[in-house]
Image (tube, helix red, strand yellow):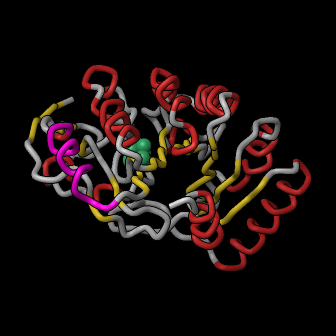
Amino acid sequence: MIIRYIKVKSALSKSNLKELDYSLNPYLGCTYACTYCYAPNFTPNKEASENWGKVIVVKENILEILRREVKVVKKGVVGVSTITDPYQPIEAIKKLTKESLRVLLESSFRVSIQTKSPLILRDLDLLEKYKSKVDVGFTITSLDNYSELEPYAPPPKARIKAIRKISERGIESWIFIGPIIRGYNDYEIEKIIEEISDIKVRVIYDSFHYYKGLKYKEGTSDWWIKIKEKITNLCKKYNLECHEEREDWVYEKKKLFKTF
Ligand code: SF4
């Protein structure tokens, strides 16, 4: 693992995602090296994007810059993170995610966190203190095939255990089932939903989208219609709130953040 340090001029980036106003990525590159990851295509550091999983770039002055920015930019919803996992192993040492969250929450920003790492539990007290301004999502892509899809990420069972704890503290919680890849994890949907069915979470799901350099193919529209039907029926069976990422979640998130 190669670790690089850079100084940045800004901490918050305007987000292209409709449900977020800003994104914050304390690191570039991600040691989890998921085989479906499209983040290298959006990572503004050549060494990290071309050596995905092997190079981590630490934005060493991000807190100093963020403290200045929160005083001048319009308040909004910040996605933490969008092109890296905010709780990958280096965070245990650097704590840039934790301290960035503290700055944002103390300054009345809202945060939407997505991770695959139980390291987030370290920050549970902080998240609970500001729970009206926080939502946390864990990605569960596969229970059986994760060693191929997510070879270096924490095991899915550990993620489920973590989101259970977060949800039990009354923090808005969600599970992202995705990307759903035809022939690789689509056969596991029932098992995943069954596994999380007793946790108070929303279920968000999405299919795989092809980006340059990825080895998987997008499924057909007929396949996706069947998958959606299956997920909808399972959610009804287990009384879970389900949303397809590209449609409903944007709206639902805006409702969540309606107090802005
Ligand atoms: S955890 Fe997310 S950012 Fe990291 S490699 Fe996997 S998909 Fe990419």
Asked if the stretch drawn in magenta spans residue 72, the answer is yes
Q: Is residue 54 visible?
A: yes
Farthest residue, direction right: 237
The quarter of the rendered structure image containing the N terminus is: top left
In-front residue for pair 194/238: 238
Q: Is residue 34 visible?
A: no
Residue 13, image x, y percentages: 26, 59
The region drawn magenta spans: 63-74
> In this image, 222 relative to 77: left or right?
right
Q: Measuring 54% from the left and 70% from the top, which residue is drawn there?
A: 218
Image point (77%, 45%), residue name: 193
Determine if the magenta segment contains residue 143.
no
Q: Position of residue 82 (x, y in %)?
A: 38, 53
Residue at x 33% of width, y 63% of height: 213
Q: Residue furthest bottom?
A: 221
Residue 184 in the figure: left or right of residue 104: right
Is 127 or 208 nearer to us in this picture? 127
The residue depicted at 81 percent of the width and 63 percent of the height is: 232
Q: How many tags in the picture?
A: 0
Q: Is residue 114 left or right of residue 10?
A: right
Residue 67 drawn at (x, y percent):
21, 42
Q: Main secondary structure of the magenta part?
A: helix
Task: Give 223 or 197, whichever is nearer the viewer.
Answer: 197
Q: Position of residue 4 (x, y in %)?
A: 11, 35
Q: Is residue 223 left or right of residue 127?
A: right
